[in-house]
Image: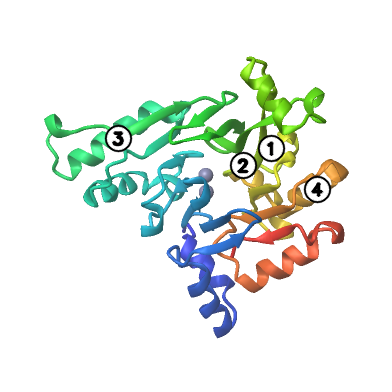
Amino acid sequence: MKTTESESVNRKQGSSDDVSDYTYTHNALRQIHVEQKRWSLRGFSISGLSTYFQIPELDLCVDMGECPMSALSLNHVLLTHSHGDHSRCLMRHNSLRRMMQNPTQAVYYIPEPVYSLAIDLIKAETLFEGVSEERFDLPRLECVKAGENFDLAYRKDLEAFPFNVKHSIPAYGYTVFCKKKKLKKEYIDYSREQIISLKKSGTEVTNDIREPIVSFMGDCLGESLWEEQHIWKSPVVVCECTFLDPDEVSMARKKGHTHIEHIAQALAKVGDSISCQSIILTHFSMKYSKKHILNTVNKIIPEEFKEKVKVFL
Ligand SMILES: [Zn+2]
Ligand SMILES: [Zn+2]
């Protein structure tokens, strides 16, 4: 007989403490907050149940496995891949905003491999709800391609870089950058007045630069963590850590997910080149209790990285 997810969850439950722990850990509307220096990451992420992230200061959501009211004011949504636990509330976001007469059209950034399927799905969903074909009108979707940066529609100071990661279906990670102007080196000792007069004479005194803010890995094999080394330049890296137990390494590979041993391997491989301040582990399998997750992370993450590594629970 096929083992269902809920059966395997039950099997791992030991004490009544664990039962209340599951009730707490598995509530997708109970949002986690992780404060950063200038912004905060909110949301929820448990494998198979739901994954969604919100960064209000960047007017940004990543994935929409659930759509709590706090997502409705955010205008940009990056989709990592089409698995239901990451994507199923995309159009709920759109329809609730319409219902609340939000005058701005949210923008949904869809990975190119599933872009046309997304259109079919949205159309089918709308017809299913009884809207006639003539009244169907597509929300604002943008097809994004791995390797091609794009500006966020309503935040010209922000840019996103989608990149391929290895999962069981086509999937992207994203790095979000802040675009800035930086004074050219040769003018660093100039006074304010001198800079103003140079500008007036038409001299370009600044260079355009971009600084990474955060990288999201989405769902992926652990090896994407060392194949996509650019992510470690972001001050915050949000990565999945679906599997924890020693006998689950091959299962992680089979399902296209990261095992905690791979996180430790990635940290060893990139070592000193890690400039990021926080590594946020997400997307744990629903069969683990919070206690088991915290104990295992504490056991496997090397001492020198313990301060950086946080669990999204
Ligand atoms: Zn997932
Ligand atoms: Zn997935």
Mark 4: few, some, or many residues within 10 Å (few <14, many ≥20)?
A: many
Q: Give the Cα separation between the discs numbered 2 and 1.
A: 7 Å
Q: Which residue is mark 2?
A: 220
The tag on residue 240 is none
Q: Does dot 3 land on a helix, a strand or a loop? A: loop
Q: What kind of residue is marked 1?
A: Ser
Q: Give the Cα separation between the discs numbered 1 and 3.
A: 32 Å
Q: Give the Cα separation between the discs numbered 3 and 2.
A: 28 Å
Mark 2: few, some, or many residues within 10 Å (few <14, many ≥20)?
A: many
Q: Is residue 15 above or below residue 244?
A: below
The structure residue drawn at horizontal position 86% and vertical position 45%, both measured from the top left corner, is 271
| One can see residue 175 in this view | yes
Q: Which residue is mark 1?
A: 224
Q: Nearer the viewer, mark 4 or mark 2?
A: 4
Q: Nearer the viewer, mark 3 or mark 2?
A: 3
x then y, percent, for residue 145: 52, 24
Q: What kind of residue is marked 2?
A: Cys
The structure residue drawn at horizontal position 43% and vertical position 36%, both measured from the top left corner, is 154
Q: Nearer the viewer, mark 3 or mark 4?
A: 3
Q: Does dot 1 land on a helix, a strand or a loop? A: helix
The structure residue drawn at horizontal position 63% and vertical position 33%, both measured from the top left corner, is 180
x then y, percent, for residue 74: 41, 48
